[in-house]
Amino acid sequence: MSDIIRRDPRAEWIARNRLHPLHAAMQPVQHSWMGPNGIIRKNPHGIGFIGPNGIKRIDRSGAQQGGASKRSAAVEVQLPLHQVPAPAFYISVVPDMVGGRLSSHDRDLLGLAHQLAGKDGAVLAVVFGEHKENAFATAGVDRLLVLDGDEFSGYAPEQRVQGLRAVDNQFSPRHWLLPDSRTGGGELGRRFAAALGERPATRIWQVKDQACIGRAGAGLQDLARPVARLILAAVECAEPVSETRHEALPVELSTAIARSLSRIEDLGAVAVDPAAIPMAEAEFIFSGGNGVKDWALFHQTAVALGATEGASRVAVDDGFMARDRQVGASGTWVTARVYVAVGISGAIQHLQGIGACDKVVAINLDPGCDMIKRADLSVIGESAEILQALIAAVEAYRNEAKRDAA
């Protein structure tokens, strides 16, 4: 036999493709290594690993599947604390906080602010109203200012501009960063820029070498300009903070905020049929696959949850769902905050389509399928029984809420 060592291109491709079922088997056993910034990194595929945000990670290599009883002790990663006792300047960030929590767009924005702040500056996050976020420290927030009050609730862009002007007068930030989004940041940033009399840099996707680069020409061209004081950044404008934790010290305004007489009356939220929401914009998707045997019960559960329905390619090909409901690389790429997969084994194309989803819940009979490995929460069992129990739990919760309101 020849002693020449030959490459296996297919094995190398599998080792690079994280979504391939044999990806974990092709990885060398490595429990820890030195990161590019000199920080010891842990193997996120280890059994019982706790991630940097304190979230317990399951074994995605498949070693725990099949009833394995031996589990190593959980190892908690303590990220280095980044402190700025006396900031030389501030970089202010106004996140959208959709649903009261930081979105992926907000975290990218905080990563960009961390780059602009450097070692001497501090990142100041300005949040309106009540929130449910408890991970400001790991997201890169050095100072947290919460502007709470009835005047900021609902759609109140003029009053929020007054609040931002008060923050600008007290802290004099070197830069203002807002998400250039349709959920409030884009409009608020442009209103704030008009109030300050400054020209904002919009649709920015990169800040480098004292220049910010934004999209132009219907997104087909890049426009470079000097770094502006007010930046409206697009998605993936920077890498989110992941290797440090910050203090997130609460701060307050020293002066009262002037109330403005709003020319816009907020009539409250309008109920929208979840079925009318485009898949790419849905926040809560209830998706069914080949494992769903009772589709009437599936539709009933989606209505009870108020979720937008989705489906795998197999369910669409079998005629159970319309083609525009297909999720995956060959269908629609979704970015839902919650994605529930019922009876979906997890083909590579489907996993690619839900790669940007925040939380994934899997209901399946097979504990070793790829969707179970991808999910943040898994329920192993017959889908019909689980869906019936889910409907009963939702109805009991709503009846209790009605009794408390009465």
Image (tube, rainbow, N blue to C red):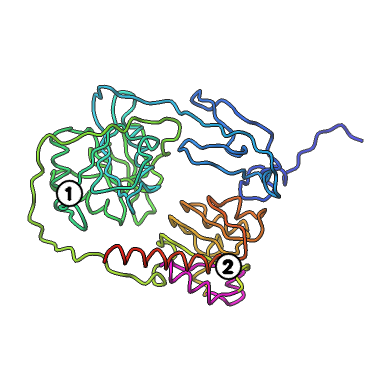
For label 1, the crowd category at 10 Å Cα-Cα, with few meaning under 14, some 14 to 19 and many 20 or more, is: few
Find the distance from the CA under tag 1 to the CA under tag 2. 44 Å
The N terminus sits in image quarter: top right
Observer able to see residue 13: no
Q: Residue at x 53, y 50 (%)?
A: 376
Which residue is at a point 17% across and 55% down the rendered structure image? 156
Q: Is residue 203 magenta?
A: no
* Tag nearer the camera, 1 or 2: 2
Q: Amino acid at mark 1?
A: Gly
| Residue type, mark 2 in image | Glu
Tag 2: Cα neighbours inside 10 Å, few (<14), some, or many (≥20)? few
Q: Is residue 5 left or right of residue 400?
A: right
Q: Circle 2 sits on which residue?
A: 385
User: Taking 277 as reference, is 159 above or below it?
Assistant: above
Label placed on residue 149:
1
Q: Is residue 151 left or right of residue 86?
A: left
Q: Position of residue 71 (x, y in %)?
A: 65, 38
User: Residue at the location (8% across, 46% down)?
Assistant: 258
Residue 254 in percent (x, y) is at 12, 34
Residue 311 is covered by the magenta coloring: yes
68 sits left or right of 154 in the view: right
The region drawn magenta spans: 294-321
Question: In the rendered image, which quarter is residue 243 located in?
Answer: top left
Contact, CB < 8 Å: mark 1 with mark 2? no
Q: Helix, strand, or loop for circle 2?
A: helix
Residue at the spot x=13%, y=46% of the render? 162
Q: Is residue 225 visible?
A: yes
